Image (tube, rainbow, N blue to C red):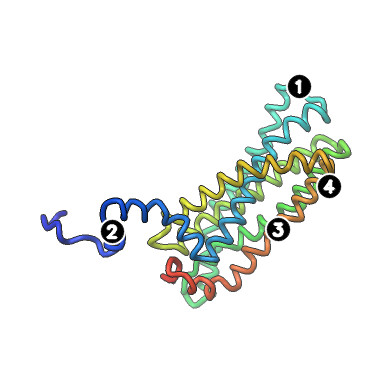
């Protein structure tokens, strides 16, 4: 509006339309971005299920600490510090290393940046999460030392954030102009997974016990770890099939 000419608009705003049509396009675009791009859709599903596992722990942790380890409510609250410790370590590593890894991979790629250069830490987190989940379950099953159980909680939250933080950076880089819509779709799917995954774990634990129940969850997480591994390798080619990720 600096020119005073209302006929001049940003070229990126022309496809929004006017009135209700533009509003409807804005509302539905997050879903359109995820469904149109197999890469973003697969990573959003992977990240959402991974993120939802933090809610599985939030639901099961108090019961395990009170019923199996016999901790008081005050001690249970203190045990939640393990979640913060794991998250802090992951945040620190991402803060210190995420850009360094990105720059190193860009340099190795003849100075050409790719969104996939954000994924190595996500892959590490995806591979360390399954054994941490299995350890969590078997510690509860056999009442292994409380210290070991809390270490498993630290490892789980370390892995969760090591997955999610670089993944968000990847979504922003890969979707470019449509990053706001892509992130909106990712967050919506993440919230849905966080609502339903803890509900599904309750009957699994009741039927299989903590050990085999969380081993099943760990196995599922290990299968999902193939998603960032495959996209790290084939993402540049796969992204070309969607108009929302063609900018690269």
The answer to whether 12 appears left or right of 79 in the picture is left
Do labels 1 and 3 touch, CB within 8 Å? no
| Cα gap from disc 2 to disc 1, whole angstroms | 59 Å
> Where is residue 64, by image quadrant?
top right
Measured from the top left, where is residue 167 in percent x and y?
Answer: 55, 56
Q: Nearer the viewer, residue 16 or 68?
A: 16
Residue position for label 4:
212
The answer to whether 175 appears left or right of 45 in the picture is left
| Cα gap from disc 4 to disc 1, whole angstroms | 27 Å
Front disc: 2 or 4: 2
Front disc: 4 or 3: 4
Front disc: 4 or 1: 4
**Of the image marks 2 and 1, the number of the one nearer the N terminus:** 2
Q: Is residue 60 above or below residue 14?
A: above
Secondary structure, mark 1, is loop
Q: Residues within 10 Å of mark 3 (few under 14, many from 20)?
A: many
The answer to whether 4 appears left or right of 83 in the picture is left
Residue position for label 2:
17
| Cα gap from disc 1 to disc 3, whole angstroms | 34 Å
Measured from the top left, where is residue 35 in percent x and y?
Answer: 51, 61
Q: Residue at x 58, y 48 (%)?
A: 92
Residue position for label 1:
72
Q: Is residue 111 above or below residue 61?
A: below
Residue 127 is labelled as 3
Do labels 2 and 1 touch, CB within 8 Å? no
**Of the image marks 4 and 1, the number of the one nearer the N terminus:** 1
**Of the image marks 2 and 4, the number of the one nearer the N terminus:** 2
| Cα gap from disc 2 to disc 3, whole angstroms | 44 Å
**Residue projecting furthest to the bottom:** 110
């Amino acid at each position: 509006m600096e020119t005073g000419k209302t006929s001049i608009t940003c070229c990126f705003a022309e496809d929004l339309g006017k009135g209700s049509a533009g509003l409807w396009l804005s509302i539905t675009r997050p879903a359109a971005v995820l469904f149109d791009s197999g890469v973003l859709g697969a990573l959003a599903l992977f990240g959402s299920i991974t993120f939802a596992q933090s809610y599985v722990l939030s639901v099961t942790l108090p019961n395990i600490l009170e019923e199996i380890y016999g901790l008081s409510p005050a001690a249970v609250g203190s045990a939640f510090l393990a979640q913060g410790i794991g998250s802090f370590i992951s945040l620190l590593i991402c803060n210190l290393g995420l850009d360094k890894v990105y720059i190193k991979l860009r340099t190795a790629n003849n100075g050409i940046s790719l969104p996939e250069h954000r994924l190595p830490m996500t892959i590490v987190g995806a591979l360390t999460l399954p054994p941490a989940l299995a350890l969590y379950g078997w510690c509860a099953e056999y009442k292994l030392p409380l210290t070991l159980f809390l270490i498993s909680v630290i490892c789980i939250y370390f892995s969760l954030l090591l997955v999610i933080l670089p993944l968000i950076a990847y979504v922003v880089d890969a979707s470019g102009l449509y990053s706001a819509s892509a992130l909106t779709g990712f967050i919506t799917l993440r919230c849905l997974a966080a609502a339903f995954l803890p509900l599904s774990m309750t009957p699994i634990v009741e039927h299989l016990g903590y050990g085999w129940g969380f081993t099943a969850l760990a196995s599922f997480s290990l299968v999902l770890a193939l998603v960032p591994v495959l996209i790290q390798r084939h993402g540049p080619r796969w992204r070309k099939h969607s108009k929302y990720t063609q900018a690269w």
